[in-house]
Image: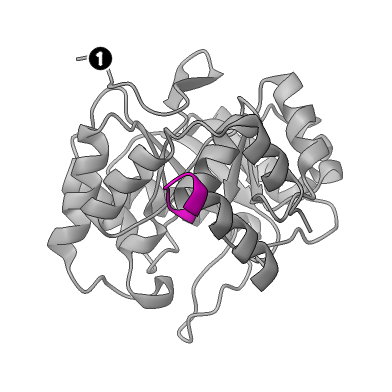
Amino acid sequence: MAAKALPGGTFTMADDLTVTRMGYGAMQLAGPHVFGPPADRDAAVAVLREAVRLGINHIDTADYYGPYVTNQIIKEALHPYPDDLHIVTKVGALRDAEGNWPPALAPEQLRQAVSDNLDRLGLDVLDVVNLRVGGLDRPTPGSISEPFTVLAQLQQEGLIKHLGLSTVNAEQIAEAQSIAPIVCVQNFYNIANRADDGLIDSLAAQGIAYVPYFPLGGFSPLQSEELNAVATRLDATPMAVALAWLLQRSPNILLIPGTSSVAHLRENVTGAALTLPEDELTELNSIAS
């Protein structure tokens, strides 16, 4: 059965990897603060099944969400997976007992993380593994050669099909590309936080996907007020406007909004179909920090 038409259509990340630009981020399937199990596991399962029913074939996850929770729920909800479903995961961090996110970039930690993702998702090979380098919203400068080389070796061993990066700068991207090709970069970016504008355009020219997280994160009160004003004029929600703006920003941008509610998932998909008029785009572009 052909996938349903979704906002933004599809993006081809590789010959064997075409994804819907409207994806789904599984982070919110875990408990509060992405720690522990969800309050309603059946609801979490229902959200994933609805995402696939709506035609979404791109799910973003990490084994350290929970930890372990989201991957276990994905397997429960969707395994055996549809042939066209692509699961993108991340390695490079852990969750400790206090709920912190310490880095886990040592070779043995990365190999264990890939093995754990395979086991908990019930897969023999992972479609895409992103190496997460920086903190929650900004890159940590420095060489990533050693950890990325480990992932490239695991790719050569047949455990990973494609590689990506998360929370990185342009220098780190170039360094990684000198080791192995990448298909995506996942960084903090939205209407008001646009430090990656040049990077997005550079990646688009190379056919590499850019996956922004925190589409409404880090806004000042004034920026939120301006976004709300545009949303009100368009009879839409601020989230819908933010997602629609990202889809119109560049054809290589993929969306992974997360939610633990079926109703909210449907709202995200419907809202992202909003077409922003030129005058509203101009106003939204002006609120960047």
* Vertical position of residue 144 compared to residue 246: above or below: below
- The residue depicted at 48 percent of the width and 53 percent of the height is 232
Give the vertical position of 175 relative to 144 (above or below). Answer: above
**Residue at 67% across, 46% down:** 284
Residue 120 or residue 227, whichever sits in front: 227
Quarter of the image with the N terminus is: top left
Specify whether residue 13 is in view. Answer: yes
The residue stretch that appears in magenta: 232-238
Give the quarter of the image for residue 126.
top left
Location of residue 31 by image quarter: bottom left
> What's the colour scheme?
one colour
Give the structural element (helix, strand or loop) at label 1.
loop
Based on the picture, tell me whether residue 91 belongs to the magenta stretch.
Answer: no
- Kind of residue at badge 1: Ala
User: Is residue 234 located in the magenta-colored stretch of the structure?
Assistant: yes
Q: Is residue 158 left or right of residue 4?
A: right
Q: Which residue is mark 1?
A: 2
Q: Residue at x 48, y 29 (%)?
A: 158
The percent coordinates of residue 264 (x first, y second) are: 29, 54
Identity of the residue drawn at 58% across and 44% down: 130
Relative image position of residue 215 (x, y in whole percent): 56, 53
Pick whichever, 280 or 125, lies toward us: 280
